[in-house]
Image (spheres, rainbow, N blue to C red):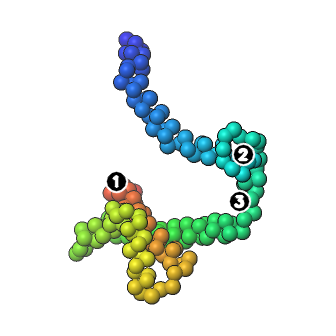
Amino acid sequence: MQLAAKRRRRWDPGNVAIGIAAASALGFLYGPIITLMVFSFNDNPITKLPLTGWTLQWYYKALTNPDLLAALWNSVIVAAAAVVICLAIGIPTAFALDRFDFRGKTIFRRLVILPITLPGIITGVSILAFFSMMEVRLSLWTVIVGHGTALTAIVVTNVFARLQRFDRRI
């Protein structure tokens, strides 16, 4: 009896419509990416159809471009340093919010959530304005500090949420 009910639900027009909608959404999101991937192997310098041949020359040029490699290395440095800042500040902050009651705790929690609720461009422009107002020369370090402070809110909220559900006896 249950097997027959499952078969009927599988071919339900509502399920088919949801499947078509999901496939269309995924196609809309991933179609351009797949198209770019296919064209990245085209040996023609102009992106056009039909594809004239297959090559890896564009990947070779990208991986031997010193400016691109420097930018990639800077991204790795910023990411690693921002993670260290986020974890060093975010985990103790989340523990403090979870374990201690202090005056202004509610306001502090709302201030911590503020970078998440604001669009990233607003946070970035605000940090840029702050550094400019303080007459700090922009460099890789300011990018690291900006990413670290903006993303600390994510660590605090996630760790705090987990600590709320955590068994205190452990």
Q: Looking at the image, which residue is at 64% across and 46% down? A: 37
Residue 98 rendering spot, x and y as whole percentages: 32, 64
Depth order, front residue of 145/54: 54
Q: CA distance from mark 1 to mark 2?
A: 52 Å
Residue linked to disc 2? 42
Quadrant position of the N terminus in the picture: top left
Secondary element type, mark 3: helix
Q: Amino acid at mark 2?
A: Asn
Mark carried by residue 165 = 1
Label 2 CA crowd tier, 10 Å (few <14, some 14–19, many 20+): many
Front of the two marks 1 and 2: 2
> Taking 31 as reference, is 127 left or right?
left
Q: Secondary structure at mark 2?
A: loop
* Residue in the foreground of this view, choosing between 137 and 114: 137
Residues under labels 3 and 2: Cα distance? 15 Å
Q: Are marks 1 and 2 in contact (CB under 8 Å)?
A: no
Q: Quadrant of residue 18?
A: top left
Indicate the position of residue 110 as horizontal and vertical percent values: 28, 67
Q: Is residue 168 above or below residue 42?
A: below
Type of amino acid at the residue the image marks with label 1? Arg
Residue 70 x %, y %: 67, 70
The image shows residue 23, relative to residue 114, as above or below, that is above
The numbered dot on residue 62 is: 3
User: Based on the displayed image, in which of its 4 quarters is residue 155 positioned?
Assistant: bottom left
Q: Is residue 96 at least partly visible in the picture? A: yes
Q: CA distance from mark 1 to mark 3?
A: 47 Å
Q: Residue at x 76, y 50 (%)?
A: 56
